[in-house]
Amino acid sequence: MLHLESLEQLRKTRRQWSQQGSVVAFVPTMGNLHEGHLQLVDAAKKLADKVIVSIYVNPLQFGANEDLDKYPRTLAADMQALTARGADAVFTPDTGLIYPRGLSEQTYVEVPHLSDILCGASRPGHFRGVATIVCKLFNMVQPDHAVFGKKDYQQLMVIRLMAEDLSLPVSIHGIETIRANDGLALSSRNGYLSDHEHKQATSVYRAMQQIAEALQSGRKDFSTLENDAKLLLKANGFTPDYVSIRRQHDLAPAADHDHQLVILVAAYLGKTRLIDNLEVSC
Ligand code: PAF
């Protein structure tokens, strides 16, 4: 696997791949890779001849009191895992390369409305940071395909809209969330949890399943279902940020006539903020 650290190395490799006629798929990550990320690499391999993964913990998408400093950085283990999984290249830019004039002087990419609801309401500026870095990385890597996890459901939608609005020549693919046997969605932030908190965290999936079963049985009392799920989370030690039943296609609040829904949850266990979601057809 090639390890590319500079834009020159990346562009040279990309040019060679184009000359060979290779289709390129890209998996942007912040590292600390787990099986969920590695399955994105598997999906990327099915789409393309060459797979490139980026590892960059993007300061622009973290709020002032968030976990930027303690976000796990495990490059050696990540490189080993990517090599074993058959990625062709890993791109590990530093902040000098990504934001040469500093964060406050950076040109931003902002997807309106969708960036301000749900996680965007609780984390102002977060999706602007995501859209900006993903747009920059797309311009650097120039992939034909890009692969993201559906675990970050709102992020995936922000990226799809950004790519469409800016006419970026890349197909965006969303891959199903990978869960542990107990239902907990794999996430780099699970590493912050103690054993006890890990057990409590499985209540997120149970809370979503409780709502999904109720929706499938025909219930439409969305606020009651959301509030009951919050009570279940609180009983398991969580401070819920939101539990929300939304339409899949635009994340607007669900109405009685909607059938393709998604349950979205964000909740704090101690200082750790976990998010998850479950799509429901009803
Ligand atoms: O999902 C992530 O890991 C990040 O938000 C992304 C897409 C790599 C942008 O920094």
Image: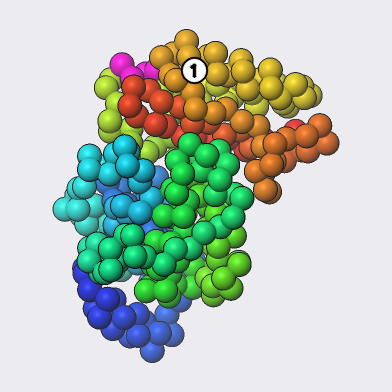
Foreground pick, 221 / 217: 221
Using the image, determine if residue 62 lies above or below residue 98: above
Asked if residue 176 shows in the view, the reply is no
- Would you call the spot at circle 1 few (<14 residues within 10 Å), some (14-19), or many (20 or more)? many
Segment colored magenta: 196-200
Horizontal side of 49 relative to 172 (left or right) equals left
Task: Say left or right for 91 vs 219.
Answer: left
The image shows residue 60, relative to residue 205, as above or below, that is below
Q: Is residue 183 magenta?
A: no
* Residue displayed at 37% across by 38% down: 187
Q: Is residue 197 magenta?
A: yes
* Residue found 24% across the figure and 52% down from its top: 78
Q: Position of residue 27 (x, y in %)?
A: 40, 60
Quarter of the rendering containing residue 273: top left
Disc 1 target residue: 233
Number of residue marks? 1
> As rendered, which of 61 and 73 lies closer to the eye?
61
Residue 189 appears in view: yes
Q: Which residue is farthest right?
A: 257
Question: Residue at left 69%, top 22%?
Answer: 223
